[in-house]
Amino acid sequence: MNTGNIVEYIDQQKIISAVILQEKQGKLRLLNENNREVNFSENRLSHISQVRLDTALSRDSIVSQLKQLTENRKKLSETINIQELWEILHEESEDIELSAMTLFCFDPPLTPDHEAAVIRAFFHDRLYFKFSQMIFAPYSAEQVEGKKRQLRETEKKERRIQDGAAWINDILNQKNGSSTAIDATIIDMLKSYYLFGNESEYTQTAKQIIKKSSLHSIEQLFHIFVKAGIWDQNENIHLLSLKISTAFSRKVLEQEQNLITNPIHFMDDPLRKNLTHIPLITIDGQSTLDFDDAVSLENTETGYMLGIHIIDVDAYIKSGDSIDMSARERASSIYMPDDKIPMIPPKLSEDLCSLKEGEIRPGISTLIRMNRFFEIQEYEIIPSIIKIHQKLSYTEANLLNGKNDPITTLYRIAIQLRDKRLKTGAIQITLPEVNVWVEENGEIGYSKIDRENSSRMLISELMILANSL
């Protein structure tokens, strides 16, 4: 390798032609086709030509010749059909050297320009051959198909980046929304990145979309979604990030409708005891729609029969069915200031599976026989048929306490139960119940309720008792 030799090297995914101005122990000083002098290692050259330029010529003249040589090599490379070569050679297992590949591509006489053109062609089209150290190895048909799929995915990703950035910029420039159509997948990618940050599987693509757009931060995506009408300005981001579904599946809704149109015949169940003659009372909040527990109190010759009753949801929803599996996933109803996400469909929780006043329902009843000192003599837990005779709010029950039975006696029982628990080491944590809601005008309202009022304490103690038996 001498001064004046024409060489080529790769810089930023481009092949650059240059001439050697100086060589010393494998270190080269080059003048390239862009009229720039660069220092380069001999090992990093992609092609070395024995053709030489006269370095004594003017710099402009050398650069002009390099540009002309580059143009000639580009034109030669464009005549090479790599796919046709692969179809001929891909069943061959042997590697192909540069000189042999040049013969496959061009008819003699061959020049260094032909070799350089081959390198350029295979450098720009890497779909069919593996190219390294002047050696060409055809990929198998399976490998080519895999690379094609990868190429299609890369092109698809690039289109999404371009389209996503254009959509964002269009929204920023429009007063309301966007006039640009957008693939829903792109919106889902941006949503995922906003909700999960770097944990999103679409992080890299979303970052590139934002970078290519006029946005400056991920936080601005929220306003883009609001302006596009995708999210509300008060969108509950926590529901989305925690992947909490607010809707029930088609299977769940179908089962719900079937239960409503084809009610179960629990009245015919021989295992259930008919307790509809006992006057049951529900005591709940003023706005409660789903009533799941009730209490009763009867006088007996030796004292009282205390009843603690709950709706028997198992009569309607069987283990492993669609509603049951959905309820297991939800685990609980979620109450928010502006919404409620029920554990089971509202037509069940607020109607069929609710202890509504005057309606007969299947229940599980805990019947506790007490003496006149409120000491437990015996108890039984049975499947039952029950009916609510009276529905009271906590406020209404408070007003009746001390005036009417059974509320007054139930309260006395609750007081004794609590005293007994505290004497045996129970810890009483007294915190107010805080209710928060959103008014129609968007204002936030709240209230604090004393959990220690008589009716709330009454229900709390009786439920603790039932669970302890």
Image: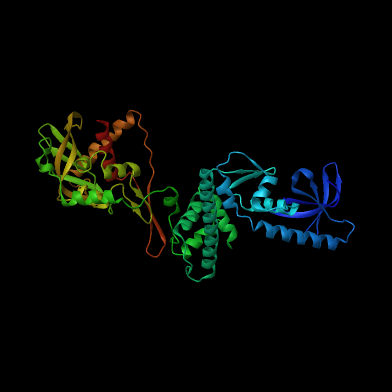
Q: Residue at x 50, y 62 (%)?
A: 224
Residue 308 rendering spot, x and y as whole percentages: 20, 38
Looking at the image, residue 33 sits to the left or right of residue 169; the answer is right
Of the 4 image quadrants, the one containing the C terminus is top left
Residue 217 in view:
no
Looking at the image, which residue is at 68% across and 60% down?
75
Q: Say which quadrant the N terminus sits in.
A: top right
Placement of 263 over or under 300, stated as above or below = below
Q: Is residue 17 visible?
A: yes
Quarter of the figure with residue 235 = bottom left
- Horizontal arrangement in the rendering, residue 117 relative to residue 432 (left or right): right
Q: In the depicted view, which residue is nearer to us: 45 or 399? A: 45
Q: Position of residue 261 (x, y in %)?
A: 16, 52
In this rendering, the answer to whether 67 lies above or below 448 is below
Indicate how the structure is coloured in the image: rainbow
Q: Nearer the viewer, residue 371 or 294?
A: 294
Q: Position of residue 341 (x, y in %)?
A: 34, 51
Q: Position of residue 377 (x, y in %)?
A: 17, 28
Which of 364/13 is in front?
Answer: 13
Residue found at the very far front of the displayed protein: 108
Q: How many marks?
A: 0
Q: Of 34 and 455, which appears nearest the observer?
A: 34
Residue at the bottom extreme of this rendering: 175
